[in-house]
Image: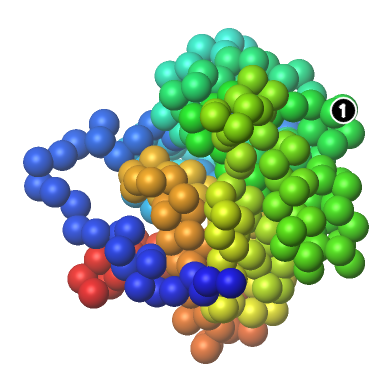
Amino acid sequence: MKKISKTIAASVVRPRPAHSHKGNYGRVLIIAGNHQFGGAAIMNAQAAVQSGAGLVTVATDLTNKTAIHARLPEAMVVNYRDNLAAYVKKADVILIGSGLGDERDVLETCFSAISSEQTLIVDGSALSMMAAFDLALPDASQLVLTPHQMEWQRLSGVAIAEQVNQETNQAALQRLAPTESNTSANNKTPALVLKSEATQVYLKDDVYQLTVGGPYQATGGMGDTLAGMIAGFAAQFAPTSSAVLAAVYCHSAIAEELSQKAYVTLPSKIAEKIPAYMKKLSEE
Ligand SMILES: NC(=O)C1=CN([C@@H]2O[C@H](COP(=O)(O)OP(=O)(O)OC[C@H]3O[C@@H](n4cnc5c(N)ncnc54)[C@H](O)[C@@H]3O)[C@@H](O)[C@H]2O)[C@@H](O)CC1
Ligand SMILES: Nc1ncnc2c1ncn2[C@@H]1O[C@H](COP(=O)(O)OP(=O)(O)O)[C@@H](O)[C@H]1O
Ligand SMILES: [Mg+2]
């Protein structure tokens, strides 16, 4: 198994070309946060903005609008029950699911509107709803799933105790490829970020092990922040597989740095440190 090294992250996060504008760094749509979980949408968006995504729009329950604007004036906010398909079509990268609760209509509207040119990241409640309602992934260009162990158990049927078996996870992942592309010539097996105290990333035939981070990260919102970082990195850096590895590394490396002076590393504190960490990395 390969290690997710700092070298990989540094090869992705390079200095920006002077000849560029926000349009070059991706339009991200975050679909997150029901009336109960507005914080998840804020943590997604904060991480995507701090990672450097060109434009970030949050589609959410409208009760979250003022809070999101107050915390994050850089993000635009729209109602996820009003014309969601149009917002999906305009985005380069769509992140759906953090704190989405049981908003099945929102999930299905998003999946139906995705085209084969877009990147789709599926997190949290969206993964649980896919399992509960037996929903298939749409035929996006790039697919990234970010379950923790329980979400992966629900979605794949692989029990947590069996998740140590890479072949079992890989076989389950292949079964989740969108049915439209499920031929050997055109198989879009999703990337899998299988989160735990020893997170692994599954990319095509390779499995990568994360070796930074620790139990100071075991706090609500940590995965919402990672999902926002993956969206922000995928919006700017290609290929998506490398962007995912770099985001996973930076998220836990920042937490590890913070843990030198903090018993618990709060997700919003990690988000605040992203630009400085990326700057340092880009100069290596
Ligand atoms: N402030 C907010 O708005 C927050 C919203 N959240 C959202 O709340 C929704 C529910 O997510 P939850 O994950 O809390 O609930 P889930 O019910 O999906 O998963 C939690 C359950 O899984 C078990 N579990 C087993 N292995 C685990 C592992 N490796 N990591 C995490 N849990 C493991 C836990 O013990 C617990 O019973 C998600 O959409 C999530 O994004 C959470 O992120 C918490 C913060
Ligand atoms: N003991 C631990 N060691 C290292 N990383 C951890 C530990 N506990 C949790 N994490 C990390 O924290 C994140 C938790 O994600 P998740 O459970 O989806 O959080 P939430 O949904 O509350 O935002 C994952 O990236 C996971 O790897
Ligand atoms: Mg989560």
User: At x 61% / y 41%, what residue is drawn?
Assistant: 190
Confirm if mark 1 falls within 8 A of ligand 1: no
Q: Tag count in the figure?
A: 1
Question: In this view of the protein, which residue sits in the foreground, 45 or 114?
Answer: 114
Name the quarter where the C terminus is drawn: bottom left
Which quarter of the rendering shows the N terminus?
bottom right
Q: Residue at 79% across / 26% down in the picture?
A: 135
- Of the residues shown, which amino acid type is indicated by label 1? Phe
Above-or-below relation of 11 to 129 = below
Q: Nearer the viewer, residue 202 or 154?
A: 202
Q: Identify the residue at the far front of this view.
A: 184
Residue 123 left/right relative to 15: right
Q: Nearer the viewer, residue 2 or 107?
A: 2
Question: Which residue lies under the disc numbered 1?
Answer: 133
Q: Is residue 102 visible from the viewing direction of this image? A: no
Residue at screen point 78% across, 65% down = 165
Q: Secondary structure at mark 1?
A: helix
Q: Residue furthest bottom?
A: 260
Q: Up-down: is 47 above or below 63?
A: below
Whole-percent x and y of residue 22? Answer: 25, 36
> In the rendering, at what x and y percent does residue 276 appear?
32, 67
Residue 231 image point, x, y percent: 48, 44
Query: Residue 56: in sight, yes or no?
Result: yes
Colour scheme: rainbow
Instruction: Classify residue 98 as left or right of residue 249.
Output: right
Q: Which residue is found at the position 63% from the left and 27% from the top?
A: 183
